[in-house]
Amino acid sequence: MSFSPEKVKELLPILTAYAEGKPIQIRKGEGWTDLDRYSFTSPVSDYRIKPEPVEVKKWLVLNTDNHTIYSAHEREEHADALLSGPARAARLVKVEVTGSYER
């Protein structure tokens, strides 16, 4: 296997991450798959360093009448402000939701 200097330069961040033990992924269709063997024969744009999961915390205000999400907030006090209104308090509840996703 031989690489041009340009291809080596493009692959360098991927190869460095691989050498550091970070997981590498390859594009498969519309998604990404973890690699278990590395040959680097596909186009450079088909490889990436697996992103770290992003932690998410939201406060949802739910409408108990029709079981729908009324609003979503990153700060609890914003959700609390909706619940303090006299007309809304009877049918809205606050729920904390946490999780993670890959970029």
Image (tube, helix red, strand yellow):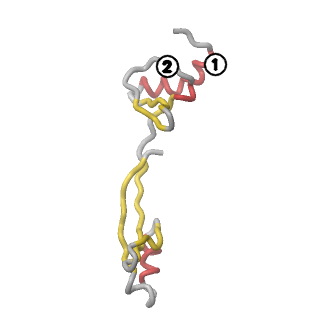
Q: Is residue 3 left or right of residue 68?
A: right
Residue under the point 47% across and 37% down? 31
Residue under label 2: 40
**Residue 102, x across and y down, in percent:** 44, 45
Which residue is found at the position 43% from the left and 20% from the top?
A: 38
Q: Which mark is residue 6?
A: 1
Q: Secondary structure at mark 2?
A: loop
Q: How busy is the neighbourhood of tag 1: few (under 14 within 10 Å), some, or many (20 plus)?
A: few
Residue 19 is situated, as x and y percent measured from the top left of the image, at: 42, 23
Q: Amino acid at mark 2?
A: Phe
Q: Nearer the viewer, residue 101 or 29?
A: 29
Looking at the rendering, which quadrant does residue 77 occupy?
A: bottom left
Mark earlier in primary sequence (1, 2): 1
Amino acid, disc 1: Glu
Check the image and report above or below for 84 versus 2: below
Residue lying farthest to the top in this orientation: 1
**Numbered badge on residue 76:** none
Where is 84 relative to 16, above or below?
A: below
Q: Is residue 71 above or below residue 98?
A: below
Please give the name of the residue rendered at 44% of the width and 85% of the height, measured from the top-left corner. 88
